[in-house]
Image: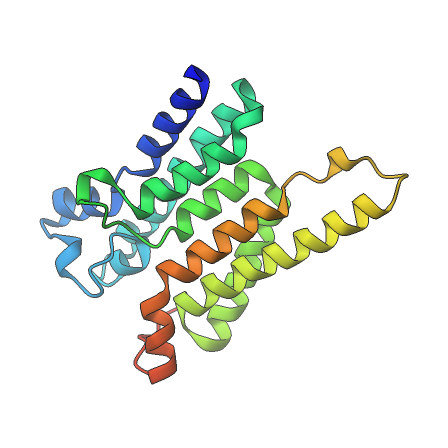
């Protein structure tokens, strides 16, 4: 019980650190919540015009998802999925900001890196390709998370059907990836509406 509480608390705490808000506040003197979409994530930080600040936010948001999952993986491996989920929820619903956080994409990427380096590369590759074609960060994020889910599910199905392959080779449980996909769709619900109404803002690549 103590281990579950420890993993849950530290994972949520790590995920809830609002790096986008902290960096823009202290380095730019601006409140990111009053700029663009009001989101604290890297995409909105990019709207300040500072690409380096946005890149730093992206990196730190990924690290805060990566770090707790890796630590849990090493010390409490049976709770790795709990750690991943709580780190993500910490970013999306941070206590410090009245549970109004970011959309979780960078944090999800960090979690993916901890769970499966190959899946994280797949996510990045898919995100870049869709971004280059359509120029929408939201669409890229949703499509990339779906791609990761589908590919992992296919791999999982093949491994479980082939007795010659050890199930241990399936690193990620597709159920947790499905939960993340649903959460990413949820955090992008306004973007989906904007895409439908053709009012979604494009990113400059």
> Which x, y percent locates residue 150?
64, 59
Q: In the picture provided, is 166 more to the left or to the right than 178? A: right
Closer to the camera in the image, 107 or 46: 107
Q: Quadrant of residue 22?
A: top left
Quarter that holds the N terminus: top left
The quadrant of the image that shows the C terminus is bottom left
Q: Is residue 106 above or below residue 75?
A: below
Between 192 and 109, the one nearer to me in the picture: 192
Nearer to me, 131 or 85: 85
Residue 167 pos. (x, y %): 77, 36
Residue furthest toward the front?
Answer: 1
Tell me if 25 is positioned left or right of 77 in this view. left
Q: Residue furthest bottom?
A: 197
Taking the image as shown, residue 54 lies to the left or right of residue 86, namely left
Residue at the image point whose x is 25% and y is 52% from the top: 40
Q: Which residue is located at x 53 percent, y 35 percent?
A: 81
Question: Could you tell me if residue 203 is visible in this image?
Answer: no
User: Is residue 161 in view?
Assistant: yes
Q: Residue 12: x percent and y percent?
A: 35, 33
Counting from the top left corner in percent of width and height, residue 11 is at 39, 31
């Amino acid at each position: 019980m103590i281990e579950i509480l420890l993993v849950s608390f530290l994972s949520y705490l790590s995920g809830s650190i609002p790096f986008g808000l902290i960096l823009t506040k202290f380095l730019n003197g601006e409140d990111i919540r009053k700029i663009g979409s009001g989101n604290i994530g890297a995409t909105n930080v990019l709207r300040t015009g500072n690409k380096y600040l946005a890149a730093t936010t992206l990196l730190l948001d990924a690290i805060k998802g990566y770090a707790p999952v890796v630590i849990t993986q090493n010390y409490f491996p049976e709770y790795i999925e709990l750690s991943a989920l709580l780190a993500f929820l910490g970013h999306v619903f941070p206590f410090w900001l009245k549970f109004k956080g970011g959309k979780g994409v960078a944090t999800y990427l960090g979690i993916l890196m901890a769970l499966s380096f190959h899946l994280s590369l797949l996510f990045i590759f898919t995100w870049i390709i869709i971004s280059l074609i359509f120029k929408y960060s939201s669409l890229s994020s949703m499509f990339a998370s779906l791609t990761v889910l589908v590919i992992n599910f296919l791999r999982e199905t093949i491994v479980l059907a082939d007795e010659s392959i050890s199930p241990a080779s399936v690193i990620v449980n597709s159920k947790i990836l499905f939960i993340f996909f649903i959460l990413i769709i949820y955090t992008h619900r306004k973007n989906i509406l904007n895409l439908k109404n053709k009012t979604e803002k494009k990113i400059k690549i």
